[in-house]
Image (spheres, rainbow, N blue to C red):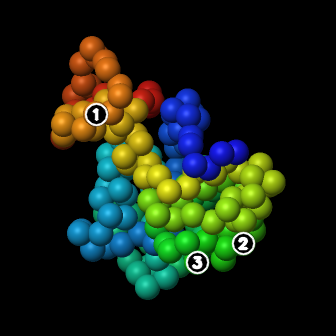
Amino acid sequence: MDHDHYSDDYIRSILTSVKSVAIVGASAKEVRPSFFVMKYMMDKGFAVFPINPGHAGREILGRMTYASLAELPEPVDMVDVFRASAAVPGITDEVLAMEPLPKVVWMQLTVRDDDSAARLEAAGIDVVMNRCPKIEYGRLSGEIGWSGVNSKTISARRPEVRAGFQSFGIRNK
């Protein structure tokens, strides 16, 4: 896999197939990117499980926080990594110990570890590095265009009005 370039179809297939996400490095601080990515993904219908050993046993956005991936109460489709690249090999070990394995490991902006990506892919797990699922979802759905950003997506679809927000969405519930 070329981790310098991902096709829109590859990213879209991940975001449309994933239903549950563990966010490693989730923060309870509203100003942290992991907080608003978690909120956005929850608003889009994803089941989100925050992972943060310093906040374990308490809630973030109404969701119980766990100390590690091993403590998750149920399987997840995707692990989203909000940690420095140096932490990725240890997280990869945790992911490979999960039963069942997640479908995807997604590493946030600036997070990359090619050796870990190779190990994960050898186990049949799709990998995305140095990308943000919130940004990619917004770009592929056309929502990011509301902010004046060229998403390279043109659509005449009307947004769907749902509880408290409008959404173009890229998946059906």
Q: Which residue occupies the extreme front position in the image? A: 4
Query: What type is the residue that disc 2 sits on?
Result: Asp
Q: Earlier in the sequence, mark 2 or mark 1?
A: 2
Query: Where residue 78 sits: x, y (%)?
Result: 58, 53
Q: Which residue is mark 1?
A: 150
- Spatial distance from mark 2 to mark 1, Cα to Cα? 38 Å
Q: Earlier in the sequence, mark 3 or mark 1?
A: 3
Residue at 44% in and 59% down: 109
Query: What type is the residue that disc 3 sits on?
Result: Ala
Q: Is residue 30 left or right of residue 71?
A: left
Quadrant in which the N terminus is drawn: top right
- Is 114 in front, or is 13? 114
Q: Is residue 40 above or below residue 152?
A: below
Residue at 31% in and 73% down: 28
Q: Earlier in the sequence, mark 3 or mark 2?
A: 3
Quadrant in which the C terminus is drawn: top left
Query: What type is the residue that disc 1 sits on?
Result: Asn
Q: Are marks 3 and 2 in contact (CB under 8 Å)?
A: no
Q: Which residue is mark 3?
A: 86
* Label 3, residues with CA under 10 Å away: few <14, some 14-19, many ≥20: few
- Is 128 in front, or is 45? 128
Q: Are marks 2 and 1 in contact (CB under 8 Å)?
A: no
User: Circle 2 sits in a helix, a strand or a loop, which is it?
Assistant: helix
User: Circle 1 sits in a helix, a strand or a loop, which is it?
Assistant: loop
Q: Which image quarter: residue 60?
A: bottom left
Q: Which residue occupies the extreme top position in the image? A: 156
Which numbered mark, 3 or 1, is in the foreground of this view? 1
Question: How many tags in the picture?
Answer: 3
Q: Is residue 45 left or right of residue 85?
A: left
Res 94 visible: no
Q: Which residue is mark 2?
A: 93
Res 42 visible: yes
